[in-house]
Image (spheres, grey):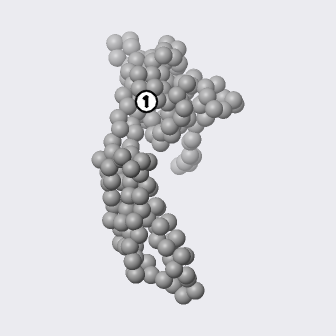
Amino acid sequence: MRYTVWQGLDRTQSQNVNPYAVFSQSFGTVDSLTLTRDSSAYRNGAVVLYEGGVVNLDLRASSQEPKRLLYIDTGLSAAENQTAAQLLAVVQAEGRKQLAEYPKLVSIDATVLQSNFLYLRDYDLGDKCDVQDDRLKQAFESRIIEVQEVWKENAHTVTLVFGDKLPVKYR
């Protein structure tokens, strides 16, 4: 057996090497677009315990945002030749690292029209594309991580699932 890793092409509008692929109702490339936001596990602050003290991290965008705290016991202590400032920096870095594991999740599913863009010709699994929700005026650069292709009653339906959404400026 032989395995290869497939990443796909960059088809975003921010590059100029490959033809771009934008999935949006205004571009006439999608029939339906479902954008789901999940913040149930999201954390924007932490109380970080270490041997000798406590550090409070507050990563809220504004003070109006409610606190969603994570409690972390690092078990860290001062090592030889380490100052208190160095220890504090290590504790804060550990807290930020663990907070990064609790992001807000964005999920996008799109049913693609097979008239303007064709699967395997204009886009493929692993391609990085632009996805725009015109009603919410939001745009994302995202990879196609799943393709569901159905042939039924002489109709070809392609549904895409995108992963690792990076917000970009809506154009």
Name the residue at 50% across, 66% down. Answer: 93
Q: Secondary structure at mark 1?
A: strand
Name the residue at 41% across, 22% down. Answer: 135
Figure check: 111 above or below 87: above
Pick whichever, 152 or 148, lies toward us.
Answer: 148
Name the residue at 43% across, 65% down. Answer: 95
Using the rendered image of the protein, determine whether residue 113 is visible from the camera's viewpoint: yes
Under mark 1, the amino acid is Leu
Residue behind mark 1: 160
Assess disc 1: are there few (<14), some (14-19) or many (≥20) residues with their C-alpha within 10 Å of its C-alpha. Answer: many
Q: Position of residue 69 (x, y in %)?
A: 33, 58
Q: Position of residue 155 (x, y in %)?
A: 39, 14
Figure check: 54 above or below 169: below
Direction right: furthest residue = 17
Name the residue at 36% across, 46% down. Answer: 64
Disc count in the image? 1
Q: Position of residue 157 (x, y in %)?
A: 40, 20
